[in-house]
Amino acid sequence: MTTHDVTVSAGSVSTRALLTGGAVAGPLYVAVWLVQAFTREGFDITRHPASLLANGGPGWIQTTNFIVSGLLSIAAAIGLRRTLAGRGRTWGPWLVGAYGFGLLLAAAFPADPAAGFPVGTPADYAEISTRGMGHFVAGGIGFTGLIAACLVIAAHYRSIGRRGFARFSAATGILFFGAFAGLSAGAGSRPTIIAFDLAVVLGWTWLTAVCLDKRR
């Protein structure tokens, strides 16, 4: 085996590892979120977004969840940069990376307590601190990156004749945009929280599917 063969083989293994990390990010994030959602006292998944879990004594769990999923998403971006060919090769990975960066910022700037969570927080508490503003910025960066990544990678799949993946990618981006816009405009009403929760699961499912597809 030549030195070139060894280098190519090592690069392939490294790329597969990066994409595997990206595929794991979503299931891991959702699992950690849901376990907390149904075990943390006072948390109502129909009223409270996942970001609120970063508050209180066990808040470090959700903060760690943001960090790990953010790093794995950035790993996915690197893996996609190596495997995407043609249309979307430049911007697709950068936008996935922006999503990962937004998750890291969300860990650095936790959401303010709100809507009665953690226990003891007034139900009408609406003060926005500096860290709370930082969290809004993190969400704007991360979710905009994810939405745009879906649409760019949809174009990539369309250009190579993968219509099923193209439609799935485009639908994910459009539905996520609608849920994010609804959450922003709905001021945390139950329907908008539920819709956004479902969109988050859909977004992670999309990233996992793309990483597994490109890993092959």
Image: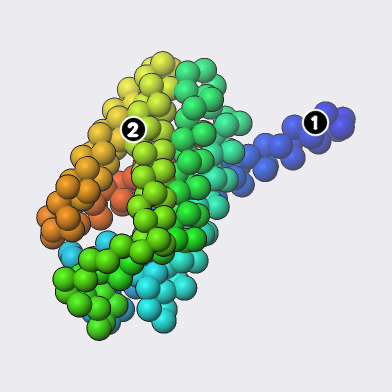
Dot 1 amino acid type: Asp
Q: Quadrant of the N terminus?
A: top right
Q: Is residue 11 above or below residue 184?
A: above
What residue is shown with label 2? 169
Q: Nearer the viewer, mark 1 or mark 2?
A: 2
In this picture the colour scheme is rainbow
Q: Is residue 46 above or below residue 121?
A: above
The image quarter in which residue 156 lies: top left
Dot 2 amino acid type: Ser
Q: Residue at x 87, y 30 (%)?
A: 2
Q: Residue at x 39, y 49 (%)?
A: 137
Taking the image as shown, residue 183 lies to the left or right of residue 135, namely left
Q: Secondary structure at mark 2?
A: helix
Q: Position of residue 135 (x, y in %)?
A: 39, 56
Q: Residue at x 33, y 67 (%)?
A: 112
Q: Position of residue 67 (x, y in %)?
A: 51, 59
Q: Residue at x 17, y 74 (%)?
A: 123
Taking the image as shown, residue 4 lies to the left or right of residue 162, namely right
Q: Label 2: few (<14), some or many (≥20) within 10 Å?
A: many
Taking the image as shown, residue 76 lies to the left or right of residue 39, namely right
